[in-house]
């Protein structure tokens, strides 16, 4: 399938999606979000793909929701457009998603990066929630995922006072997994995605789900969820293969069954 606002390609076991609206700093308009969810869902359903990378350009990951598209909209039009609900489509993806961020990740762009499971940042990455400058607040998880990631003090400063985090600050505060030179960030994200993609697919799926439950359930409920997921995996061929391979001192041959 060809897209107008993104590029989508397979690199062996990894699906790579590149946001591609350079004229608008990769601003996330309705068309881009719809195409992004379509491309993510296609990779999620593709057995050849084990993990997904979402990238922008070196200059900008995404400068937020498209302000010119939103500027004149009423509250009722915003509700009817279901624009922000498109973000739920990212949450629905079962395979691991890695954001490769360079340059600006602002507003909805920062929220998009945080909706992914891991973030590889270039030294030029900048993370911010500048919605307060527009008379609004983050609407796609910025007040929640950011607070979980960096804690209340830094989140308050970012959301209330437009503090922009450098890549090294983002690493220090736990928002990103690693910071690497600009020339390497895409490669590093791709290599990380390939390593993840080589793992047991059903265990990966359960693992992603279980870690996310830490944000959604009470500790008692989440521990129960984890235990059930752990037991479930003993019904898979991959658990038998993985443990046999360890005992026989060989590498496992995962089947995703
Ligand atoms: N929306 C629309 N167009 C944009 C956006 C945007 N978010 N950001 C940049 N552009 C456009 C500019 O208007 C400009 O267009 P033109 O060349 O036609 O004038 C072009 O991109 C280049 O931008 P600049 O000239 O401003 O480039 P600079 O290098 O000087 O500055 C910045 C780059 C700092 C990124 C600057 O463009 C900026 O501050 N952008 C806006 C950032 C922002 O406020 N983001 C938050 C938006 S609101 C939001 O995200 C709410 C999310 C709610 C839910 C999300 C659902 C998806």
Image (cartoon, rainbow, N blue to C red):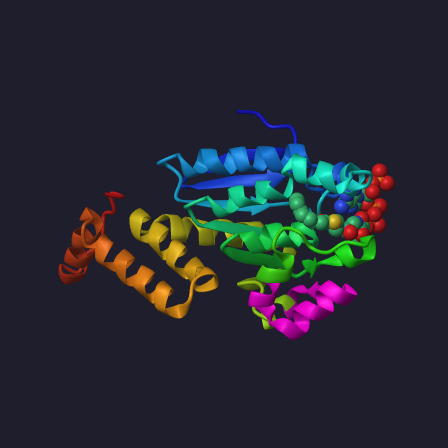
Q: Residue 187's x, y, as percent? A: 53, 50
Start and end of the magenta stretch?
Answer: 146-169
The overriding secondary structure of the stretch rendered in magenta is: helix
Q: Nearer the viewer, residue 228 or 168?
A: 228
Instruction: Place residue 163 in its image quadrant.
Output: bottom right
- Vertical arrangement, residue 29 with respect to residue 130, above or below: above
Q: Nearer the viewer, residue 195 or 257?
A: 257
Query: Residue 202 in magenta?
Result: no
Return the residue found at the far front: 76
Residue 185 visible somewhere in the drawing: no
Q: Residue at x 37, y 64 (%)?
A: 222
- Which quadrant holds the C terminus? top left
Q: Residue at x 66, y 75 (%)?
A: 153
Q: Residue at x 80, y 39 (%)?
A: 68
Query: Residue 163 in magenta?
Result: yes
Q: Residue 121's x, y, as percent? A: 60, 58
Q: Residue 29's x, y, as percent? A: 69, 37
Residue 165 visible somewhere in the drawing: yes
Instruction: Place residue 14 in its image quadrant.
Output: top left
- Vertical arrangement, residue 82 with respect to residue 136, above or below: above
Return the residue found at the far top: 1
Query: Relative to residue 146, is residue 158 drawn left or right?
Result: right
Query: Relative to residue 228, is residue 134 drawn left or right?
Result: right
Q: Nearer the viewer, residue 58 or 242?
A: 242
Q: Nearer the viewer, residue 27 or 82?
A: 82
Q: Residue 35's x, y, as percent? A: 59, 33
Query: Relative to residue 235, is residue 24 drawn left or right?
Result: right
């Amino acid at each position: 399938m060809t897209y107008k606002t993104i590029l989508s390609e397979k690199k062996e076991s990894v699906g790579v999606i590149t946001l591609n609206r350079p004229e608008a700093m990769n601003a996330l308009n309705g068309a881009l979000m719809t195409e992004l969810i379509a491309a993510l869902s296609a990779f999620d359903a593709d057995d050849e793909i084990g993990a997904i990378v979402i990238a922008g350009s070196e200059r900008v990951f995404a400068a937020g929701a498209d302000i010119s598209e939103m500027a004149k909209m009423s509250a009722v039009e915003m509700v009817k457009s279901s624009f922000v609900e498109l973000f739920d489509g990212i949450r629905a993806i079962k395979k691991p998603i890695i954001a490769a961020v360079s340059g600006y990740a602002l507003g909805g762009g920062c929220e998009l990066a945080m909706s992914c499971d891991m973030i590889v940042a270039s030294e030029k990455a900048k993370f911010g929630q500048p919605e307060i400058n527009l008379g609004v607040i983050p609407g796609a998880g910025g007040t929640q995922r950011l607070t979980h990631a960096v804690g209340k003090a830094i989140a308050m400063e970012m959301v209330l006072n437009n503090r922009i985090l450098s890549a090294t600050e983002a690493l220090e505060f736990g928002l990103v997994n690693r910071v690497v030179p600009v020339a390497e960030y895409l490669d590093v994200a791709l290599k990380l995605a390939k390593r993840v993609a080589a793992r047991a697919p059903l265990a990966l799926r359960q693992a992603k789900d279980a870690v996310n439950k830490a944000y959604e359930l009470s500790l008692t409920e989440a521990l129960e969820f984890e235990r059930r997921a752990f037991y479930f995996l003993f019904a898979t061929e991959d658990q038998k293969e993985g443990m046999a391979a360890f005992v026989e001192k060989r590498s496992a041959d995962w089947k995703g069954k």
